[in-house]
Amino acid sequence: MNIETIHGLEEFDIDRRIIRWIMKRAGNPRISIRLWNGDHFWVTEERPVACMEFRSRRALLDVVLSPSVGFGECYSNELIEIHGDFLAFVNEITAAATRKVNGQYYGPKVGSMLCAMLGTSLARSWQNVHHHYDLGNEFYKLWLDERMVYTCAYFDPPSASLAEAQLAKLDHVCRKLSLRPGQKVIEAGCGWGALAMHMAEHYGVEVIAYNNSDEQVNFAKETAAVRKLDGRVTFIKDDYRNINERCDAFVSVGMLEHVGLADFKTMGAVIKRNLKPDGIGLIHSIGRSHPKKADPWIRKHIFPGGHMPSLSEMMSVFEPHRFSIIDIENLRPHYAQTCEMWLKNFETVADEVSNLYGEDFVRMWRLYLAGSAAGFRSGTLQLYQVLFTQHGNNKAPWTRKYQYLSEPRIH
């Protein structure tokens, strides 16, 4: 054996040591590793669910320097490849990492508190929304349901299709709000308008919906006009902080994650000044079981400024303004199934997406959707629906029965 061969073996022994150190920090997931020279080994003695291939030493260094951003960017740029079932791989990585950090509380909480010091200006809020939601309506039409609902579905029964589950979610929200004909509803962050139009059409309420996204508001206005609902639903392109309409119900589905922890109290103040004394509100948000700042790769590439709050952090919306919490429901398994269905739909149109945005974009979104599904499956992420009312409102429902009864719609 010559000197060059010995030197090469030493290099790859170092590479293996580095990878084993990384994998130990990640909870020793049941995967195998393949290096750029063809060297292949298992992380644990258990049968791997998939193989992660480092195609260059640069990818290894990037992951060492920043595990989340490094892995995400290297996968998107094809410096890392996954062989086998991609969702199974991400589920395994996420579950292992979750087990590894189980019991850690104060460190992640401090990190989350530091994020709370960074408020979001109106201009920055618009930029954050534009980054994710103004990619083009045609893109989202490719893999969402026909109503363009981009939030957690409600699978009742669990075998429901995505479209059926999204419709069930719309009704579930409406029943919780005890909507009655003639009421005025404010919606903050309305997406493509599915909930606003559903409330107006099937529950006979007037809806004023706010959103910062050009693409979404334009789509919602056009759809409402086609469905002849534009007289009952008003879509306004503006920030939630500028809402100034007295209402019987206030609802926000999938927006609190974008508000930023520093502005939760501001969100509460907006609701306080608009919700009538006997009104009811609902906030539906991705969350966590404990405080932790958002994943660095997600904040950089998917949701700039995003924060998934714990329940204690969500209380910053309610407690300073003395709101009464009526009900809290966690739909975590429902969101796992929703994301898995989105991922399946996305994979069927991956070639079309690649033609529009490039292969690196496809790989980035594949990782985002799979990672989201895995986050909910593992319990890293939660999905909270918090129902509340003004302090001292004695007209609030006494039981939860009304939330699950199959009530007739207006039409």
Image (spheres, rainbow, N blue to C red):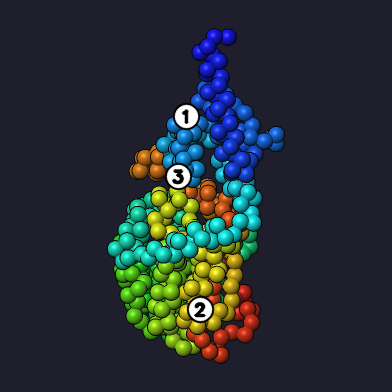
Q: CA distance from mark 1 to mark 3?
A: 16 Å
Q: CA distance from mark 3 to mark 2?
A: 35 Å
Q: CA distance from mark 2 to mark 1?
A: 51 Å
Q: Give yes or no for contact between labels 1 and 3 (Cβ–Cβ under 8 Å).
A: no
Q: Give yes or no for contact between labels 2 and 1 (Cβ–Cβ under 8 Å).
A: no
From the viewer's perspective, is 19 left or right of 363? right
Q: Which residue is mark 1?
A: 57
Q: Which residue is mark 3?
A: 69
Circle 1 crowding by C-alpha within 10 Å: few under 14, some 14–19, many from 20? few
- Name the residue type under label 1: Arg
> Residue at 34% across / 63% down in the picture?
125
Q: Secondary structure at mark 2?
A: helix
- Name the residue type under label 3: Val
Q: Secondary structure at mark 1?
A: helix
- Name the residue type under label 2: Glu
Which quarter of the image is occupied by the N terminus?
top right
x and y percent of residue 407 in the render? 57, 77
Residue 399 disc label? none
Q: Which residue is mark 2?
A: 319
Tell which circle, 2 or 1, labels the residue nearer the N-terminal end. 1
Circle 2 crowding by C-alpha within 10 Å: few under 14, some 14–19, many from 20? few
> Residue at 33% across / 69% down in the picture?
239
